Amino acid sequence: MKRTVIAAVLLCSVSAFAQKFEGLALTPPMGWNSWNCFGCDVNEVLIMQAADAMIESGMKDVGYQYIVIDDCWHGERDSLGFIHPNPEHFPSGMKVLSDYIHSKGLKFGIYSDAGWKTCGGHPGSRGYEYQDALTYAEWGVDYLKYDWCNTDDLNAKGAYMNMRNALFAAERPIVFSLCEWGNNQPWEWGKEVGHLWRISGDIAPIFDGEEGHGSWISWGVLQILDMRPDIRKYAGPDHWNDFDMMEVGNGMSVAEDRAHFSLWCMMASPLMAGNDLQHMSQETITILTNREVIAVNQDSLGIQGFRCYQKDDWEIWAKPLKGGDMALCFLNRGKNTEKIEFDWGEKIIKDDEFKKQVSFVEKEYQIRDLWTKKDIGTTKQIFKTKIASHDVVMLRLFKK
Ligand code: GLA
C-alpha cells in the first residue's frame, strides 16, 4: 500500500514537472550534420575532422556550434538494453568523441528514432527512451535529432513527448529536434515538445525539382520553401520551423547555393550545414560564413520571413527584424537573368501575422546589399539591379 502511494507520488511529480528544457534555442540552432554528405558512412575520425574544419574554416567564429552525427553510428543494445556505438567505426566510444568536440568549444549532437528502428535500420529508441536519454546525458550529448521511421501506429505527439520527458528526467539540457517530416502537423504541438521540427521530407541537392526514391521523394530548395506557406505563425524563439539540413556545397551552382542559404536565413530556419567541411571551396566558405546574412537568421525577434511581392519569375521575401529594420530577398526563380527596377515609392510591406510594417512614404530607409557588402543608397531612389537565374539579391533596410 505504502509503496503504491510512493510510486503514485513519484509518477505525479515526474509528469507534473516534465517539460522541454527552455531557452536552449532562442535563435535558430547553427551547426553541421553528417547525413546529407556522408549518409551511413560515419566514423569517429570523420566527426573529429568535421569539428576541426568547423573551426579552421571560421564557421565557429560566425556562430556554428553543433556537430551532429546522424543515422548509422549505432552498434547493438547490450543484455541490459543499453545502446552502444558501432565498435569498428567508433572504437574510442562516444564519451571520448564528445569530450573532443567539447574541448574545441563546440557542442555534440546525436540521432535516434521514435520507432523500433532508425530509417537506416539501426536500433530505435521505442521502449528504451528513458534508458537512451540517460546514456546520451552520460555521453555529454547537447542535441538530439529524433526521426520518425518504423513508428507503426504510434501517436506522434505522444511519442515525441515521451522522449522529451525522458530527456528532462535525465537532467542534461539537450536541444530536441523533431524530425517527423510534417506528417502530423508538428508546428501545432511542437512548441511545448521540442526546439525545432522538420516541416518536410528530405532535401536533395537540387534547386528546383524533386528526386524519386521508390516509396519516397526528396525535395528541392524551392519545393521546401513553397511547401507550407501558412505555418510561419508557429515559429519563434525556442521553437522553429526546420527547413532541413542545408545542401550548400553539395553540387548546386554557386548562385543556387547563395540563394538556398539566403532563403534559409530569411525563413529563420535552423542552419545545419550538410556538406564536407574538410573539403570546401572558397565560394562555399564565403556563403556559409556571411555574418550579415547570418545576422538576419539569428535576429532576436525570431520572425520567419514571407513572400511579399511577386512579378513574373521574380519575387521578394521579407523578414521583419529587431529595431524596425527589414531584410528583403529578391529571388529569381526563372531560367533567365531578370532586370529589375523597383520603385519603393508608395509601397508598403505589411506583415499581418506579426503586426509589422514598413511604409516608404512615411520613412526613408538606408539600403545595404548583404552579399556585395555595400551601402547602396536609400528607398528614395528606384532600386535597379540584375539577378541571374536561380540567384538572389539580399538587402537589409535600416531606418534612417
Ligand atoms: C530520415 C531523415 C533524414 C536522415 C535519415 C537517416 O530520412 O529525414 O534527415 O536523418 O532519415 O536515415
Image (tube, grey):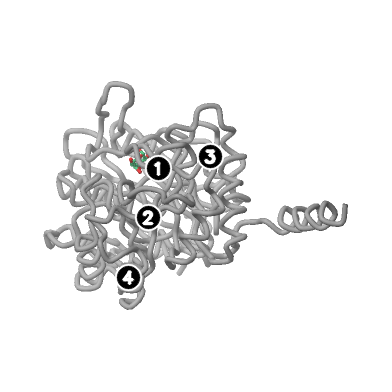
Amino acid found under the numbered disc labelled 4: Val
Residue under pointer 2: 84
Which image quarter has ligand 1? top left
Of helix, strand and loop, which one carries label 1?
loop
CB within 8 Å, label 4 to label 3? no
Residue 358 visible at all:
no
Instruction: Please tell me which of labels 1 and 3 falls first in the chain.
Output: 1
Q: Residue at x 18, y 47 (%)?
A: 250
Residue under pointer 4: 96
Instruction: Please tell me which of labels 4 and 3 falls first in the chain.
Output: 4
Q: Does mark 3's beta carbon lie closer than 8 Å to ligand 1?
A: no
Residue 25 visible at all:
yes
Amino acid found under the numbered disc labelled 3: Ile
Q: CA distance from mark 1 to mark 3?
A: 33 Å
Of helix, strand and loop, which one carries label 2?
strand
Residue 231 image label: 3
